[in-house]
């Protein structure tokens, strides 16, 4: 059985959109609110009004940076955990 798509009305940077997606409507709204906030944050860094395309690209770059930073942090955390596990296994092996 195929997942049902939900039609959701969202607002991003003053524009209304109708989004149809197979996800929880509240989740879709949270994503839209996050993007809207990031775009407004970028716009606030300029003394003059910028095009919404420019703001969207810069906000997208900021969000991508957040994602890459989080992913790198997760990867280094996994690597650190693997090293600790290996050390513990060696200690156990040595004591047996």
Image (cartoon, rainbow, N blue to C red):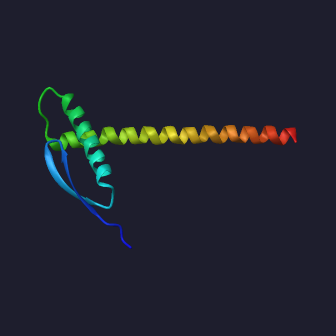
Q: Position of residue 27 (x, y in %)?
A: 32, 50
What is the tally of numbered marks visible in this picture?
0
Q: Pick whichever, 80 or 92, lies toward us.
A: 92
Quadrant assignment for the C terminus: top right
Question: What is the quadrant of residue 1 in the picture?
Answer: bottom left
Residue 1 lies, with reference to residue 51, above or below; the image says: below
Q: Residue at x 26, y 39 (%)?
A: 59
Q: Is residue 4 left or right of residue 11?
A: right
Of residues 25 and 36, the one drawn nearer to the viewer in this rendering: 25
- Residue 42 x %, y %: 23, 33
Q: Residue furthest bottom?
A: 1
Q: For this view, does 22 lie left or right of residue 9?
A: right
Residue 87 rendering spot, x and y as whole percentages: 73, 38
Nearest to the observer: residue 36 or residue 51: 36
Of residues 32 and 76, the one nearer the viewer is 32
Q: Residue at x 51, y 41 (%)?
A: 74
The location of residue 50, given as percent across then percent down, is 14, 36
Residue at 11% in and 33% down: 49
């Amino acid at each position: 059985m195929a997942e049902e798509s939900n039609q959701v009305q969202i607002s991003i940077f003053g524009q209304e959109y109708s989004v149809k997606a197979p996800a929880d409507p509240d989740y879709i709204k949270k994503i839209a609110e996050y993007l809207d906030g990031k775009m407004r944050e970028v716009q606030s860094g300029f003394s003059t009004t910028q095009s919404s395309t420019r703001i969207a690209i810069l906000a997208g770059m900021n969000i991508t940076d957040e994602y890459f930073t989080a992913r790198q942090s997760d990867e280094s955390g996994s690597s650190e955990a693997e090293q600790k596990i290996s050390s513990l296994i060696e200690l156990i092996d040595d004591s047996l």
